[in-house]
């Protein structure tokens, strides 16, 4: 017995690629005529319409006093509060009997950027920074020592203030 | 004072206490802590800090709980509005001149001023416009630094030196808000027990130079232990940080050391952190020692002991635990055994104000325990015998090179040691054991009180407690001999053969110890 196959008539109008291609081209040419919104980062960095929040919590910065020494007194609160356990602190005493950190290291890879260290610091020494460009060629470079933390120049974060919840 | 009990109600809780008890102690029994600074159970009470003011019904004014004795039917309110207000005011006065340098203060985290201000102090100062008084830091003595700015003038240190140490070198100088703790001219705080003023100080005013800036209070792990410095057996706490012992502090035990500890004991912790330890069992292979696993080492011990008979000598340290001493003695039971401990001596330094408390001449903690487990003090005789013995076991004692030369003539020399001494290269078997800071064990002090110390840090490498080493070797030597699984089992097992230790368990010793019958009679 012969097998009969039902042959459908193809809807040539609906499946024509020419129509779809023209539609796509129209969108393309429309955007070619509009002003560009893409910024050529990192070659180009806009200063005004591409700022980040003052409350941004990025890599740390250690503030210094007038004489250029770190404000840190090695009280040990930041390693204690740090949920990621990324701060290493060894306290010591200088020639004037002041307590200061012999070793202060932050492993920025381990850090979760919660900002607790800044919040807990009684001396307003350690801060998280408004900064996002942290690329390095070596993993080891992500452990910031005291000297490096002091050398950072980026602005420091303004943490969220519970008494002024909507303020910046 | 009679023994009659009186009933007082403290914050709604009724307690019965002996007549003559101060209110503050009665409140403690009711589970209520009356905040206080100048009061200390081991010192006379001057009631100067005014912190323990409580409201007593029918009394016209608030009364200091530290010097008010209980009377029958008294109703006391520790946390009433009037009492809380009084304490808040006292704290406000104390903080007028307090520098609030908690971030750099060693006491932060264990400071009573910090605690009470946090609990019931004012949130902010009302004296912001006035400069705080300032006095320079003073060096009081070998280990004590006085930081007058932090001082709240509770005078505990003055009273300790006066009434307990009975060497009154401290005083309160000046008056009013200029007052500070002074030291007499040309005097230093170098009394053997002077270090206690650091513990007594409720704030960070008197600090230990040794501990200064070393660790924060909240970083420390605290372990109940016994001081291994002398035969007094003071109870102490080992504070460790990251597996390193950073300080020793006294732990209250009213029957032994009350709240105190001598400076010699306090400073004697550096050996616990030594790095030059034996970390693996070593057995002789040809002319040198070779590191092996525990099974091979213990088999070698058992084989050696099985082959030998005749004389055996144990040269032990009286710093070893009763368990270790007993188990090592048991290991060599089949021999004609001579066992001795070395007892190093030093000067005796009593604490005048407390009966039966001194830094003792015998500078090891477990001489009584060693005597109970079959050891003698005849070290020289034992050393003499060692040269001709079949087996010599050296337990936790550092022999001098000369002594070791005399010992090595013996058939087999087995060393159970902690520190890797050059002389041990000549031994046949060297087994690494834990120090007292690294094991659970017990000591018997000179008054026959058996006390438990607990493990404060991990032992390095393959080191194991000496009782384990001896018992495991014993298990391999004699088929069917029971081997204790824990130090607690070991003391129970020793109790079965040593009448004086019968019935002794870690549970019954608890945190304050238990008297046992010693060689020189039953403990009082």
Image: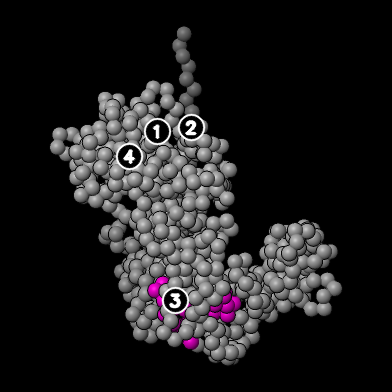
| Position in image of residue B397 (x %, y %) | 32, 47
Mark 3 vs mark 4, foreground winner is 4
Chain under label 4?
B
Chain under label 1?
B
Callout 4–callout 1 Cβ contact below 8 Å: no
Q: Residue at x 30, y 34 (%)?
A: B312
**B178 horizontally vs B8: left or right:** left
> Disc 2 and disc 1: Cα gap in Å?
10 Å
The residue wearing badge 2 is: B497
Q: Secondary structure at mark 2?
A: helix
Q: Residue at x 72, y 77 (%)?
A: B86
Does mark 1 fall on the same chain as mark 2?
yes
| Position in image of residue B235 (x %, y %) | 51, 56
Q: Secondary structure at mark 3?
A: loop
Does mark 3 fall on the same chain as mark 1?
yes
Q: Earlier in the sequence, mark 1 or mark 3?
A: 3
Residue sitting nearer the eye, B152 or B127: B152
Task: Indicate which disc residue B330 carries.
Answer: 1
Task: Indicate which disc residue B314 carries.
Answer: 4
């Amino acid at each position: 017995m012969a097998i009969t196959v039902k042959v459908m008539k193809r809807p040539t109008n609906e499946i024509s690629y020419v129509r779809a291609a023209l539609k796509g081209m129209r969108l393309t040419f429309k955007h070619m005529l509009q002003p560009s919104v893409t910024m050529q980062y990192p070659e180009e960095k806009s200063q005004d319409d591409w700022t980040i929040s003052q409350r941004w919590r990025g890599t740390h910065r250690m503030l210094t006093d007038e004489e250029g020494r770190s404000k840190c007194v090695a009280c040990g609160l930041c390693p204690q509060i740090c949920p990621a356990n990324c701060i290493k602190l060894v306290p010591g005493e200088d020639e004037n009997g002041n307590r200061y950190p012999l070793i202060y290291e932050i492993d920025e890879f381990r850090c979760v950027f919660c900002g607790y260290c800044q919040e807990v610091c009684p001396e307003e020494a350690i801060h998280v920074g408004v900064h996002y460009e942290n690329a390095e060629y070596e993993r080891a470079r992500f452990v910031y020592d005291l000297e490096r933390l002091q050398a950072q120049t980026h602005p420091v974060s303004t943490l969220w203030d519970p008494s002024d919840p909507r303020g910046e | 004072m009679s023994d009659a009990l009186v009933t007082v109600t403290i914050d709604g809780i009724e307690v019965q206490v002996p007549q003559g008890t101060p209110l503050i102690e009665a409140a403690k029994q009711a589970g209520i802590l009356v905040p206080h600074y100048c009061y200390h159970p081991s010192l006379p009470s001057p009631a100067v800090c005014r912190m323990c003011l409580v409201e007593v019904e029918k009394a016209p004014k608030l009364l200091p709980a530290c010097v008010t004795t209980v009377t029958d039917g008294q109703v006391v309110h520790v946390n009433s509005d009037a009492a809380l207000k009084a304490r808040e005011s006292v704290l406000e006065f104390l903080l007028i001149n307090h520098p609030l340098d908690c971030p750099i203060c060693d006491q932060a985290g264990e400071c009573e001023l910090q605690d009470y201000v946090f609990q019931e102090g004012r949130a902010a100062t009302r004296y912001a416009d006035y400069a705080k008084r300032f006095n320079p830091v003073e060096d009081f003595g070998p280990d004590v630094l006085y930081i007058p700015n932090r001082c709240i003038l509770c005078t505990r240190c003055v009273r300790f030196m006066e009434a307990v140490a009975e060497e009154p070198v401290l005083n309160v100088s000046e008056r009013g808000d200029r007052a500070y703790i002074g030291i007499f001219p040309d005097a230093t705080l170098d009394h053997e027990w002077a270090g206690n003023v650091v513990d007594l100080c409720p704030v960070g005013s008197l600090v230990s130079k040794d501990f200064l800036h070393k660790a924060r209070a909240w970083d420390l792990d605290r372990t109940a232990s016994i001081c291994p410095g002398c035969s007094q057996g003071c109870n102490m706490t080992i504070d460790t940080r990251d597996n390193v012992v950073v300080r020793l502090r006294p732990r209250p035990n009213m029957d032994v050391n009350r709240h105190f500890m001598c400076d010699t004991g306090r400073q004697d912790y550096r050996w616990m952190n030594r790095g030059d330890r034996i970390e693996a069992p070593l057995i002789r292979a040809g002319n040198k020692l070779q590191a092996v696993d525990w099974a091979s080492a213990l088999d070698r011990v058992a084989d050696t002991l099985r082959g030998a008979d005749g004389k055996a000598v144990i040269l032990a340290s009286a710093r070893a635990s009763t368990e270790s001493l007993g188990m090592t003695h048991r290991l060599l039971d089949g021999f004609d055994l001579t066992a001795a401990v070395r007892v190093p001596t030093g000067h005796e330094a009593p604490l005048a104000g407390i009966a039966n408390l001194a830094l003792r001449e015998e500078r090891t903690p477990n001489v009584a325990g060693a005597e109970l487990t079959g050891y003698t003090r005849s070290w020289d005789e034992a050393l003499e015998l060692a040269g001709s013995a079949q087996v010599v076991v050296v337990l936790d004692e550092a022999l001098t090179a000369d002594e070791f030369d005399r010992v090595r003539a013996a058939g087999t020399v087995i060393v159970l040691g902690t520190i890797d001494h050059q002389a041990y290269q000549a031994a046949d078997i060297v087994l690494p054991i834990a120090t007292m800071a690294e094991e659970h064990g017990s000591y018997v002090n000179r008054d026959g009180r058996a006390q438990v110390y607990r493990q404060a840090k991990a032992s390095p490498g393959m080191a194991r407690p000496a009782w384990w080493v001896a018992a495991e070797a014993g298990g391999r030597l004699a088929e069917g001999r029971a081997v204790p699984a824990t130090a607690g089992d070991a003391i129970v097992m020793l109790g079965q053969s040593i009448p004086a230790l019968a019935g002794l368990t870690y549970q019954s010793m608890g945190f304050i110890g238990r008297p046992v019958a010693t060689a020189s009679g039953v403990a009082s």
